[in-house]
Image (spheres, rainbow, N blue to C red):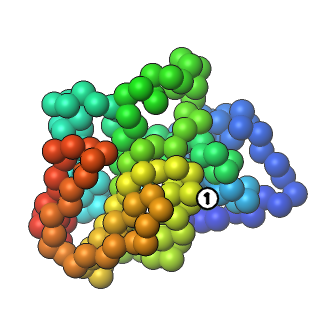
Amino acid sequence: MTPLALNLDTVELTDEQFYQLCQNNRELQFERTAKGELIIMPPVGGESGNREADLIIDLGIWNRQTQLGYTFSSSTVFKLPNGANRSPDAAWIQKQRWEALTPEQKRKFPPIAPDFVIELRLATDDLEMLSSKMREYMDAGVILGWLINPQQQEVGIYRQGQDVEVRNLPTELSGENLLPGFNLSLYSYL
């Protein structure tokens, strides 16, 4: 099942209205593009949910050991500087940036772009849509991002100010200078 995009050209949701829509429909997962399109994300199946959970666990364990920041699941909606509301499959924010937010900003949809994001392509996901989402993250200030594409046995590595590096699976990914010591073997995601 692919995401459903609703064109809301004539309806403009405020940030508070979008937040309330999400709160009133917790069984659904929403995103909103910078153009105001409302995207209803379908639930994931067991295999994809397991892969996503493994990514979050690996990132979370590394973060607990280093205590350099905060890890977020795909249920977290971030308000990006371009006005979009996006939910990466896994995200991480440096400690000092997260702690600079107010308690209210942390409680609702944080107005901050993560420093690091992971997107895991599902069998039904449109690759161009996900690639566009990754470019949007980079434009918003994300420093490092990985688009894992099991269907084509590859991963796209997005770095601020650089062309996308594509590697074939299996491969070992590094958190580079941003996430020192974080390595992810993509053998188990095949």
* Residue at screen point 47% across, 50% down: 142
Residue lying at the far bottom in this picture: please name it: 152
Q: Which residue is mark 1?
A: 39
Task: Give the amino acid at mark 1.
Answer: Ile
State the residue in front, 69 or 133.
69
Q: Quadrant of residue 173?
A: bottom left
Residue 189 or 157: which is nearer the viewer?
A: 157
Q: Residue at coordinates 22% horizontally, 79% vertically from top-left? A: 168
- Asked whether 63 or 90 is in front, the reply is 63
Residue at the top extreme of this rendering: 103
| Residue 64 sits above or below residue 152 on the image | above
Q: Is residue 143 above or below residue 156?
A: above
> Does residue 81 appear to the left or right of 12 in the view shown?
left
Say if 177 sits above or below 64 in the image.
Answer: below
- For the question of whether residue 95 can be seen, the reply is yes
* Residue 179 x, y percent position in the rendering: 26, 44
User: Pointer 1: residues within 10 angstroms few (<14), some, or many (20+)?
Assistant: some
Label 1's element? Answer: strand
Relative image position of residue 53 (x, y in whole percent) = 25, 49
Quarter of the picture holding the C terminus: bottom left
Q: Position of residue 49 (x, y in %)?
A: 29, 55
Q: Position of residue 42 (x, y in %)?
A: 48, 60
Tell me, yes or no, if residue 72 can be seen here: no
Is 38 left, or right, of 77 in this rendering? right
- Residue 156 higher or lower than 143, as above or below: below
Is 37 placed left or right of 158 in the picture?
right
> What residue is drawn where x is 65% and y is 57%?
33
